[in-house]
Amino acid sequence: MQDILDEINAELSSRSERGKVATYIPELACIDPDQFAMAVVLADGRTFSAGCADKLFSIQSISKVFTLTIALGKLGDGLWSRVGREPSGDPFNSIVQLEHESGKPRNPFINAGAIAIADAIMMGHQPKETLAEILEFVRFLANDRSIGIDENVARSELLTGHRNASLAHFMASFGRLSHPVEQVLGVYFHHCSISMSCQQLAHAGLFLVADGVNPSSGVKVVSAQRARRINSLMLMCGHYDGSGEFAFRVGLPGKSGVGGGILAIAPGKASIAVWSPGLDTVGNSKLGAEALEMLVKRTGWSIFGN
Amino acid sequence: MQDILDEINAELSSRSERGKVATYIPELACIDPDQFAMAVVLADGRTFSAGCADKLFSIQSISKVFTLTIALGKLGDGLWSRVGREPSGDPFNSIVQLEHESGKPRNPFINAGAIAIADAIMMGHQPKETLAEILEFVRFLANDRSIGIDENVARSELLTGHRNASLAHFMASFGRLSHPVEQVLGVYFHHCSISMSCQQLAHAGLFLVADGVNPSSGVKVVSAQRARRINSLMLMCGHYDGSGEFAFRVGLPGKSGVGGGILAIAPGKASIAVWSPGLDTVGNSKLGAEALEMLVKRTGWSIFGN
Amino acid sequence: MQDILDEINAELSSRSERGKVATYIPELACIDPDQFAMAVVLADGRTFSAGCADKLFSIQSISKVFTLTIALGKLGDGLWSRVGREPSGDPFNSIVQLEHESGKPRNPFINAGAIAIADAIMMGHQPKETLAEILEFVRFLANDRSIGIDENVARSELLTGHRNASLAHFMASFGRLSHPVEQVLGVYFHHCSISMSCQQLAHAGLFLVADGVNPSSGVKVVSAQRARRINSLMLMCGHYDGSGEFAFRVGLPGKSGVGGGILAIAPGKASIAVWSPGLDTVGNSKLGAEALEMLVKRTGWSIFGN
Amino acid sequence: MQDILDEINAELSSRSERGKVATYIPELACIDPDQFAMAVVLADGRTFSAGCADKLFSIQSISKVFTLTIALGKLGDGLWSRVGREPSGDPFNSIVQLEHESGKPRNPFINAGAIAIADAIMMGHQPKETLAEILEFVRFLANDRSIGIDENVARSELLTGHRNASLAHFMASFGRLSHPVEQVLGVYFHHCSISMSCQQLAHAGLFLVADGVNPSSGVKVVSAQRARRINSLMLMCGHYDGSGEFAFRVGLPGKSGVGGGILAIAPGKASIAVWSPGLDTVGNSKLGAEALEMLVKRTGWSIFGN
């Protein structure tokens, strides 16, 4: 495995076409695009990595996997009255679908859906309490209490996040939010601003590898059925309108973030985190997807194969 | 396995909510909705079935799996300039997406995409020759030379298929078809009118179970990569705007048809065909999906699990 | 003329189908739907009225005629880089068109367009100053210094105006607003909350009757060309996706508000204000439109006739 | 008046920016773009012209004014169950609106609407009979029996008219056409291929100037109300998604065709035909609209002015 990761790192380090760093969040715009990191945690707990796998980056939308898991824990199938589970066929921040479907977001991973999830998690609590709960859960999953929120990124999003504010107000106009728009957005922007390393992120995803049980600790995080369903949502909707492309090329459930990270799950085999800040045209890490494609080709981990 | 199928058959036979038989194709409207059949062919070739698994039904859109396979054989990755590979988020016969994307269909499984595939397969030949080729391929896959086209269904579709004619002319207006609209529609309507039993269909899908090789005959139909990619397209787009739902509940690549059939693939394990003519609101077999959900729950075959 | 108005009033007072009072602004929801008023000011200054023509009502979107006039005075044709001048074919609060056209509203009379106009008028000033300017202009047009803003309505809109907040943030996300969203919305909600009577409103519209000159005072408000263009925008876009219907039935430039008022202009002949709080399904005053239809039938004032 | 037309002709003859000749109908693609013609028939019957006002051109969508008039004569207000009367906000050949509104076209002047009108006129007759009736009506209006159909243009449209075929099949799929698609398209393509000169066209429009009565002959063609309503539809929808622009700049009801012609009506004053084959980006005659703008500026004929 280490050889494979080294090979991938070597091959990708020579790439000149690395995509473009996200610019709409000012704090992310100044990240050096030449960075790369990858970490693989096998089901048996062994860990491998390449590149700057301890370097913190902004996980952004990858955090939606964790908030979805929390929301399912709180509301169970009741969550699906608030958010759908179909791919949207639209960009991550599209509002067209919302107007056509009475303000109900298509799935938990487009921005509108994740905002609805943040609202669902709050359950009458203050943003600060809700964020503490989310952070606690991520630290528990990764077994690392050092994980925190990058306040500069959160502030940067709050100032420029007009599109997300528009989505939230739009849902509120249909009576679909239970808390004040500003508070929901506060929770959303902050959980997107969690900073993690590839090492931490790969560990945090491990419960999705083994049917809901963390194989290192033996702790059951969610039921087998729920773990599988979260994986299915990641596959169907985890890369916005590039989800089909990712399934086609990589063949693993995955969730990307505009910070350049991707968390991918090979059920029964491994949790994989990869980071490279340059994005492709639909907003997913360009080299990250390529690294995963190379990894799957070498390991045969595609969920669509024998 | 036989016990599982018998259980499923018994449990479903008592269901009163069976969905509605498709009415827009007159010849399909008169099918008795109380029928049910299921066949499972394991990777080692053993076959199990329940219900009227030898009864022929109209495979309709399931045929798109076979035409896609043929088209990939002829054009390779060149096919993707003609059709995309993202879920559409729209009903199977929507035209809105086509207008927004210059007449290029989102994926090979929505109607517009399958019409584009039919056009791609023709390569200058007559409809009759193309249909012979498609039929030959399906017979080869199922190892059954008795498989044929139901001319009554084909004629029924031709007479009422204004929506598909609209899609085809729309694509033609963007210069996206290489053959006359009437000929392309002829091929499309006829390959949708292939009749098969669950037994035949499950055998025909077997090459997708074992990375492109038919495990009974040892014949390599497509490369491992191509088999996996076809599976990924089935998962992402095989149930129209119910694809997310199917992935969530069943967790297997599958392709449905408005005739009430579903072909599902459990990679490395089995090819499964199920048939029940009543459809849910998005046009997929209601009891068919339930039968698959029960099967996966009992076997643990979800591609998203350990 | 007085006979005509009395006839109309008499005929409409017996109507039981009066439409529904707007409910999304709480302060408007409690208005008695059985009220009716109409005022006609001829080009020579003679005034006629029927019903409670001195009763104040919330002019709502009719105010957009006045803010458009101010904006054209400040920016001239430069305004058209910020807002289009085509009918939208969509409801007044639709956001779909905005996404398809990079956040540029179709015309000045849909909500998004009027919000963009409010932003254009501000020119670096505070909301309070801008509102004072708008109010001053309306008082000048109506020659009545008593006209004011209903603060209860404005507050009611601010609290529930999530849809408009969504539109404003959406435009802001495309960099289309020059002032903070909250300030622009403050101006917008307040100018929509101006209260006027039919008498006042008909007088305020008089400059559009006589090619930009107030015929009673002789004061030139705008150029002849501008007056005609404002009339054309009222005809094309003044009743949202009921504009075609209004042109077809009434045949006069007009602007409606969800408070139940309509201002209509018969060029060269008269300025007409009508008020009845019940709305039709697209949000225009039901009896108001009927009253205008009756008036035009009796006077032959249609701009489409001889 | 003659001086005005000569001035306009002189000024426009020096223009180098003349728009682009429509290319999607092959027969129209080879027209010389440097041609210009204009004819004005006053309400009192006096006629003025400039340029090649006797030269025949393909009136294309201008014919929709005549088929709408015939359809209203046959079905009266019953027509409005088949076609709406709102501007569409979309290009002339858009299909998106049709899908969102169950196959009912927004108005009689977009292509889908005119196809529905052709179907409505047929009333069980053959295409040839229907075309004879349309042609007879146009000859009667223009008082010129020499007017005919250009068969080369009609054939050219039939061969390449996939977009219109798509619209027709789409409506048929909703059960909105009463005759076979091919027959309806035959009627539509042929009435669009009527050839007329500006002289003939201006005479044919005269009944819309004088409330439905042809002022030269005294013959009543339609009621005053119907004439006004047709004018309102021309204003609201006569230039596709450039209708707002045309109302804003010209201020007269008008109908354009992709052949480069425009028929405009100044109620009570004149019927005007103008022709210049170069089109603007939304498909309306570029110089034609400018000529009308100049004419209205010099005559003060805007329906929005005093």
Image (cartoon, coloured by chain):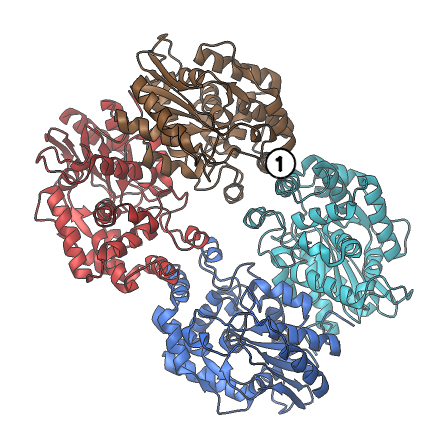
Chain colours: A brown, B red, C cyan, D blue
Amino acid type at mark 1: His
Q: Dividing the image into 4 quarters, which one contains the N terminus of chain B?
A: top left
Is residue C250 something that shows in the picture?
no
Near-viewer residue (A130 or A265): A265
Residue C85: give x, y in percent of width and height.
65, 59
Residue at image position (30%, 39%) is: B233
Residue at image position (63%, 86%) is: D50
Residue C117: give x, y in percent of width and height.
72, 49
Pointer 1 residue = A162
Residue A114: give x, y in percent of width and height.
51, 29
Near-viewer residue (A208 or C51): A208
- In what element is the residue under mark 1? helix
Please, which chain is the residue tagged with disc 1 on?
A: A
- Left or right: where does residue B103 sit relative to residue B156? right
Please tell me in which quadrant of the rendered image residue A275 appears: top left
Residue D113: give x, y in percent of width and height.
48, 66
Please determine whether, in this image, residue A34 is positioned above or below residue B151: above
